[in-house]
Amino acid sequence: MAAKEPSQRISDAATVDEYLARLDRPERTVLAKLREQIRQAAPEAEEVISYQIPTYRLHGPLVHFAAQPKHLSLLYRSSLRRLPTPCPSTMVAPDGFTRFM
């Protein structure tokens, strides 16, 4: 049987811990670090799974992250576009979507 793509393995995760646990080590390590950075930057944000991906809410949606088959994503509200990109190899789209790794 073929290995499942990340989106198939994690689509039914009920918590962020469960979401991360289902990822392979490289993706899990990067997204766990991103999770900690989000928690440090917004300690009062509520951590939930929304649209099958980890989401942080603080007076509405704040940021989301996801593991895709060929990249990792950070999605954020348009008001956060002034933040620096996570690394030089990051691609930032004008719609509040950042792809990395």
Image (spheres, rainbow, N blue to C red):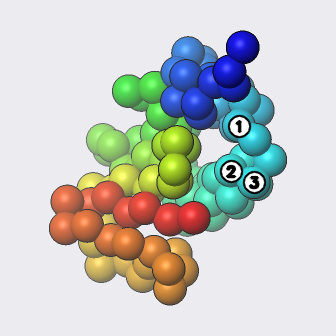
Residue 91 in the figure: left or right of residue 39? left
The image quarter containing residue 85 is bottom left
Which amino acid, by three-letter code, is at mark 3?
A: Pro
Tell me how far mark 1 sits from mark 3, CA to CA.
8 Å
x, y percentage for residue 32? 71, 52
Query: Pointer 2 and pointer 3: residues touching (CB < 8 Å)?
Result: yes
Q: Which mark is residue 36?
A: none
Which amino acid, by three-letter code, is at mark 2?
A: Glu
Badge 1 element:
loop
Residue 30 in the figure: left or right of residue 53? right
User: Which residue is under mark 3?
Assistant: 26
User: Which residue is under mark 2?
Assistant: 27
Which amino acid, by three-letter code, is at mark 1?
A: Leu
Furthest toward the bottom, the residue is: 88
Q: Which mark is residue 23?
A: 1
- Is any part of residue 81 visible from this angle? yes
